């Protein structure tokens, strides 16, 4: 969860505030901000479900539902940021796109492994995206 916080507040929030302050169409920006924040909340719920499953049964094999929550939640979070950043900046930071690709690859790679491995892999992707956003 700390990586999600880092991904959002390190750069995206500041971009959003700056765009709103300088926007000719504040309503349009607000509309995108509202929808992307709602998607991020849904993503957080999915991530929390995956985390709870891994905490309760770390040694169990991954199921399809677990994989969807564990990798789909972070993917939805990054996708919401992609939508927002594309609409306000006109481009998407490469780290968000690479994060989405990494989540898809790791979802497949960790499917036969334990729940704790899946959580570690998805968390590593979010930390990498956050670091890339900070370095940029």
Image (tube, grey):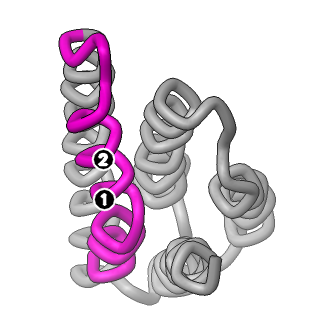
Q: Is residue 10 magenta?
A: yes
Q: Residue at x 66, y 43 (%)?
A: 92
From where the camera sits, is residue 68 visible?
A: no
Q: Which residue position holds label 2?
A: 18
Identify the image quadrant of residue 125.
Answer: bottom right
Measured Cα–Cα span from mark 2 to mark 1: 6 Å
The mark closer to the camera, 2 or 1, is 2
In the displayed structure image, the side of residue 73 where residue 31 appears, left or right: left
Between residue 81 and residue 51, name the one nearer to us. Answer: 81
Q: Is residue 12 magenta?
A: yes
The rendered magenta stretch, by its main secondary structure, is classed as helix
In the displayed structure image, the side of residue 114 where residue 76 appears, left or right: left
115 up-or-down from 72: above or below: below
Q: Residue at x 28, y 82 (%)?
A: 2
From where the camera sits, is residue 38 visible?
A: yes
Q: Which residue position holds label 1?
A: 14
119 up-or-down from 87: above or below: below
Where disc 2 sits, the SS reads helix
2 up-or-down from 50: above or below: below
Q: Which mark is residue 130?
A: none
In the displayed structure image, the side of residue 71 where residue 136 appears, left or right: right
- CB-based contact (under 8 Å), mark 2 and mark 1: yes
Quarter of the figure with the C terminus: bottom right
């Amino acid at each position: 969860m700390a990586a999600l916080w880092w991904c959002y507040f390190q750069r995206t929030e500041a971009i959003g505030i700056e765009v709103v302050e300088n926007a000719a169409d504040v309503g349009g920006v607000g509309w995108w901000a509202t929808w992307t924040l709602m998607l991020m909340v849904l993503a957080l719920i999915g991530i929390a479900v995956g985390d709870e499953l891994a905490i309760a049964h770390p040694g169990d094999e991954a199921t399809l539902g677990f994989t969807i929550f564990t990798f789909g939640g972070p993917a939805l979070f990054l996708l919401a940021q992609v939508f927002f950043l594309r609409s306000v900046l006109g481009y998407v930071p490469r780290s968000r796109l690479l994060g989405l690709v990494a989540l898809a690859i790791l979802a497949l790679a960790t499917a036969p492994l334990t729940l704790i491995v899946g959580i570690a892999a998805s968390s590593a992707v979010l930390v990498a995206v956050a670091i890339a956003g900070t370095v940029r």
